[in-house]
Image: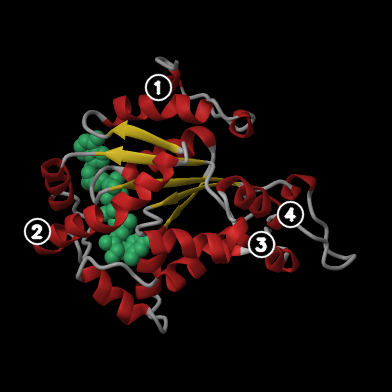
């Protein structure tokens, strides 16, 4: 279980949050601490988690590619949309508000989404996460940094033309309340206005990997493979799948 060492938090002044400084502090703040002598912390938990943000417009194939990444590299998939839909299904206190926002293609307040993600990150035994469909806005991004105190190692961007995304969403067939043309049009506008700046942010930080999201699912995954293969932290858990390893590198 990941635990933040909250005592470290006041040491970070807003002015010292350069990428390097923030990254270093985030890593330290993810160090586990032994709360009491009865609690055992495994050595692997002393390292910072490996975090990937998966971005792209609605229907660009984020969820589909995440499944492939999980199969091959064993990362833990956290879909922000799925966590929000679970709140609706469980009828929690935020459930009704979340439902209305999703129906309207709007973004759920950062506090709500970040808290859900934080809970999953902290309670998981995993040390490698794929955070799918988040951050959707600059405000989301800043809230994650502030609350979770972690930075992504990799940001994937599935780049897909609008007409292709519309076609896919309208054929998705998962009974989602937002898979209709009216909501989809709103979502595309929100994507351009609010998610593009996040993509630009990570591009400027040198963390962005842009994937051409048009074509066969397997061919798209072939663009993703070398990105993850290059990270030492993921090598030991690499699950060699003959279907996906043929064209590697
Ligand atoms: N490369 C692809 N070509 C055609 N259809 C795809 C492709 N990738 C995913 N799909 C389909 O498009 C729909 C949206 O994909 P999904 O992975 O849910 O996207 P996102 O999570 O980005 O909204 C799904 O029905 C999925 O099966
Ligand atoms: O960080 C997030 C992720 C999702 N959503 C809401 O959940 C919807 C569906 O998101 P999801 O990622 O499941 O959609 P996808 O892009 O996969 O179609 C979005 O339109 C938003 O209304 C949100 O508010 N914040
Ligand atoms: Mg999705």
Residue 2 x/y as whole percent: 67, 58
Disc 1 marks which residue?
243
Mark 4 to mark 3 CA distance (whole Å): 16 Å
Tell me whether circle 1 and circle 3 mark residues in contact (CB < 8 Å). no
Between disc 2 and disc 1, the foreground one is 2
Q: Give the residue drawn at x 40%, y 56%.
A: 135
Along the horizontal axis of the image, is 42 left or right of 211?
right
Which of disc 1 and disc 4 is earlier in sequence? 4
Q: Do labels 2 and 1 touch, CB within 8 Å?
A: no
Judge the density around disc 4: few (<14), some (14-19), many (≥20) Cα neighbours within 10 Å.
some
Please name which of the two marks, 4 or 1, marks the residue nearer to the observer.
4
Q: Residue at x 15, y 62 (%)?
A: 186
Determine crowd level at label 1: few under 14, some 14-19, many 20+ residues with C-alpha closer than 10 A. few
Q: Is any part of residue 175 visible from this angle?
A: yes
Comes first in the chain, label 2 or label 1 = 2
Residue ID for mark 4: 31
């Amino acid at each position: 279980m990941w635990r933040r060492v909250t005592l470290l938090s006041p040491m970070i002044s807003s002015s010292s949050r350069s990428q390097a400084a923030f990254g270093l502090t985030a890593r330290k703040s993810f160090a586990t601490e032994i709360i009491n002598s009865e609690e055992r912390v495994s050595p692997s938990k002393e390292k910072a988690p490996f975090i990937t943000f998966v971005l792209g417009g609605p229907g660009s194939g984020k969820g589909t590619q995440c499944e492939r990444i999980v199969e091959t590299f064993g990362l833990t998939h956290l879909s922000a949309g799925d966590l929000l839909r679970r709140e609706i299904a469980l009828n929690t206190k935020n459930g009704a508000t979340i439902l209305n926002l999703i129906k309207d293609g709007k973004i759920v307040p950062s506090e709500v989404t970040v808290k859900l993600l934080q809970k999953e990150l902290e309670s998981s035994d995993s040390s490698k996460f794929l955070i799918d469909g988040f951050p959707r806005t600059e405000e989301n991004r800043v809230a994650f940094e502030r609350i979770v105190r972690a930075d992504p190692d990799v940001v994937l961007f599935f780049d897909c033309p609008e007409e292709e995304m519309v076609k896919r969403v309208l054929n998705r067939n998962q009974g989602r309340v937002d898979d209709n043309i009216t909501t989809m049009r709103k979502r595309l506008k929100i994507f351009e206005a609010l998610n593009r700046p996040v993509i630009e942010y990570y591009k400027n930080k040198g963390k962005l990997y842009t994937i051409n999201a048009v074509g066969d699912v397997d061919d798209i995954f072939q663009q993703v493979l070398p990105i993850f293969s290059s990270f030492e932290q993921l090598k030991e858990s690499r699950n060699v799948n003959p279907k996906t390893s043929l064209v590697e590198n």
